Image: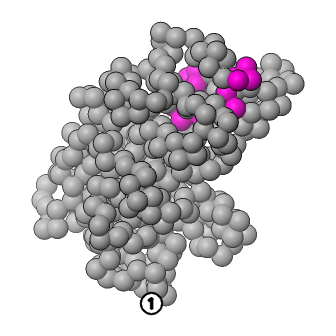
Amino acid sequence: MLAYTYRETNKFVLEEKERPRLLNPQDAIVRVTLASICSSDIHIKHGAVPRAVPGITVGHEMVGVVEEVGQDVTKVKPGDRVTVNVETFCGECFFCKQGFVNNCVDEHGGWALGCRIDGGQAEYVRVPYANQGLNRIPDDITDEQALLVGDVLATGYWAAKISEIGTEDTVLILGGGPTGICTLLCVMLKQPKRIILSEVDEARIKFLQQHYPDVLVVNPKETDVEQFVKEHSDHGGADRVLEVAGGKETFELAWKSARPNAIVAIVAMYEENQILPLPQMYGKNLIFKTGGVDGCDCDETLRLIREGKIDTTPLITHTFPLREIEKAYDIFENRRENVIKVAIKIKEEKESL
């Protein structure tokens, strides 16, 4: 089968690999029908994910059809259309039982697919702990509607959840990329008093203004975001800040824009260490919450999609076949052609290089 493989820093290769097989009774084999490129894949490419294992197939955002299941798999069966969760988790350890599935103690617990074990930018993928890692897609939901459920939408849902957003809150979201927009969609479900979103890319600003006109969108290149937030909040800063951008200055902007005793949720991945200037923060009494995502609410987000309360399909601006994945990466990584999210269509018939 064809698979996109992490060889070394700054080198991904599309190559032939053996089709995966069941390794334990809780595994499932999924024929991938649609995959996507995530900014985390770019972090792997840049060498910024130390746990990533050279030789693995990348990709952790995908949907497909169950081909084969182990004898202990009861949640899904061959022929089911499924989303694949970015997190691998056993469901039985201390952390899993608390809902902290990102810290599952299994050797492959947490973010494994496309990082430490073969992922889904390929024709087939093996999913460990399939009872936890797969969610059946209702017949009236398309692959495109479900594509982002297992990772970027799961991240947004988790971020909104841990931020404890109330209806009187002013919420600041830093970053209007795919994860930022998914976070926005989930924050909107909480119906806060106002939402402010900071984004530097003009095309994305236009997208946000077109699709979410009630959101106050600011460009930090043109506006002092910290001052803007103070002027548009009730208590001298945002009640909740969700940092999704991962830029060089966005961590500092996050805590500076928060009011005293606010919650600051760090959703982004950084490629450089960040500074926590405690003397400057002293007395502000902020509560920091940090990720990775505990992606265990996928059935709930599928329900919300089915009810029309979440729609991520406008984010998919480009679609390419697997054989053109290098072009897809170039467009996504370099933000060409006003890209937001790229889908990779996987053909059922065997492709050749």
Q: Residues within 10 Å of mark 1 (few under 14, many from 20)?
A: few
Q: Which residue is mark 1?
A: 71
Q: Quadrant of the N terminus?
A: bottom left
Taking the image as drawn, is residue 122 in sight?
Answer: no
Q: Is residue 56 left or right of residue 31?
A: right
Whether residue 289 can be seen here: yes
The x, y position of residue 30, in whole percent, is 33, 72
Residue at figure coordinates x 83%, y 31% from the top left: 285
Q: On screen, 35 above or below 194?
A: below
Highlighted magenta segment, given as a residue range: 234-251
Residue 232, horizontal then vertical, whole percent: 62, 19
User: In the image, 164: left or right of 154?
Assistant: right
The extreme right residue here reads 283
For numbered disc 1, what is the local secondary structure?
A: loop
Q: What count of labels does the image hold? A: 1
Q: Amino acid at mark 1?
A: Gln
